[in-house]
Image (spheres, rainbow, N blue to C red):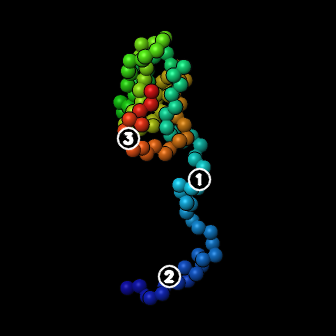
Amino acid sequence: MARPGYMIPELLGRLGKKPVTVLYPYEKLPTAPGLRGKIKFHTDKCIGCGMCARDCPSGACVMVEFKGEGRKKSPEFNLDRCTFCEQCAESCPKDAIELTGEYELAHFKKNELIIR
């Protein structure tokens, strides 16, 4: 059994020091370089080849009908299934896909996690 008051010296030692944690929603620490966060898709660079959907190991990228000129299909990314492995960005021949440093992906509606 622990003796009473054994933490008092530790508490007194911490009073003059700065806090160990940050106030997260108001203060944010810088992200690590090379962080693979939210996908950013450049529709103007995409040629609709489907390499990203073919190479996606989790099935988060699927090809859907494109309502526009120039190509028949366009990728659609479901971030709720994505493992952020960056395979889609590596297999894209036109560099139309990149992973940003944005890591806050919580949403109230599931359709907000779809990137077209």
Which label lies toward us, 3 or 1?
3
- Going by the numbered disc 3, the residue's amino acid type is Lys
**Whole-number angstrom distance, CA of label 2 to CA of label 1:** 30 Å
Q: Rate crowding at label 2 as few (under 14), some (14 to 19) or many (20 or more) other CA atoms within 10 Å.
A: few
What residue is rendered at 53% in x and 25% in y? 42
- Going by the numbered disc 2, the residue's amino acid type is Met
Helix, strand or loop for disc 2: loop
Horizontal and vertical percent position of residue 53: 40, 24
| Res 57 label | none
Q: Rate crowding at label 3 as few (under 14), some (14 to 19) or many (20 or more) other CA atoms within 10 Å.
A: few
Q: Rate crowding at label 1 as few (under 14), some (14 to 19) or many (20 or more) other CA atoms within 10 Å.
A: few
Residue nearer the viewer, 2 or 31? 31
**Residue 62 seen in render:** yes
Where is mark 3, residue-wise?
Answer: 109
**Residue 56 seen in render:** no
Residue nearer the viewer, 98 or 114? 114
Where is mark 2, residue-wise?
Answer: 7
- Going by the numbered disc 1, the residue's amino acid type is Leu
Q: Quadrant of the N terminus?
A: bottom left
Q: Quadrant of the C terminus?
A: top left
Q: Is residue 70 above or below residue 74?
A: above
Q: Is residue 65 above or below residue 9?
A: above
Which label lies toward us, 2 or 3?
3
**Whole-number angstrom distance, CA of label 3 to CA of label 1:** 27 Å
* Marked residue nearer the N-terminal end (3 or 1): 1
**Whole-number angstrom distance, CA of label 2 to CA of label 3:** 46 Å
Q: Quadrant of residue 9?
A: bottom right
